[in-house]
Amino acid sequence: TTTTTTTTTPTTTTPTTTTIQIEKEASQEANEITGRWTVDTTIGTFGINESSSSFVGFRIQEVLAGLGEITAVGRTPELEGNLLFKEGFLLEAEVIADLTNLRSERSGRDSRIQSALNTSVHPQAMFTLNDPVPITDNRSIDSIAPGFLTVNGLTNPVEANFQAELVGEIVTVVGTFEVNLIDYGVQAPSAPIVVSVEDKAIVEFQLFFTVD
């Protein structure tokens, strides 16, 4: 009697998605700027001349008796705000700064700054985005944000030059724009030592956002 032995070759199924692919896709999604982000004021350390934290501030040229021309710098770390990136656009942006905490590199100037900005009546400044800003890179943006700035109860259109970059789980946004003091009903502070002050100021900002 002849016995026939049948050998069955085992079959294998190749997974359509490997663990490595899943991890890679998850990493790519985590590194995208898409989503809603909120200002995080717990990051870094605040300083007037050097700061590793979020701040909004100004720079303005003035001439002081005996010192000549200098750049006056003022900043506040008391902020709130958010960004919304969606479908290839920066769709929303709002930043609110508490001007009652605005401090300069010369403490003797601070009370006059508060008075000039009328912070006892209008303690906050606010920027809101007016039109969506297209983005072509999910990690880095260099563009112009058209919006409205409200200071001293008066609102005017501005265009902020800004750069945004996603590093790890933090979006860093830095930028500047110019304002005319008269547009916001602001008269430059005066003092015996002050010879003159420019009628324009540069608003500057450094903001750290974390995802909601």
Image: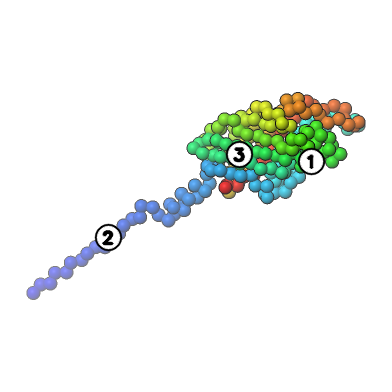
Q: Tell whether label 1 touches label 3 (CB within 8 Å).
A: no
Question: What residue did someone put label 1 on?
Answer: 103
Residue matched to label 3: 164
Among the two numbered marks 2 and 1 on one chain, the one whose residue lies closer to the N terminus = 2
Q: Residue furthest left?
A: 1
Residue at the spot of label 2: 11
In the image, residue 123 lies at what x, y percent? 74, 38
Secondary-structure class at tag 3: strand
| Mark 1 Cα shell of 10 Å, populated few (<14), some (14-19), many (≥20) | many
Using the numbered discs, state the Cα–Cα distance from disc 3 to disc 1 in whole angstroms: 25 Å
Q: Residue at x 36, y 52 (%)?
A: 16
Q: Nearer the viewer, residue 100 or 30?
A: 100
Q: Quadrant of the N terminus?
A: bottom left
Q: Is residue 38 left or right of residue 2?
A: right
Of the numbered discs 3 and 1, the one sitting upstream in the chain is 1
Q: Secondary structure at mark 2?
A: loop
Q: Is residue 1 visible?
A: yes
Which of the pair 156/73 is nearer the observer? 156
- Quarter of the image for residue 125 reads top right
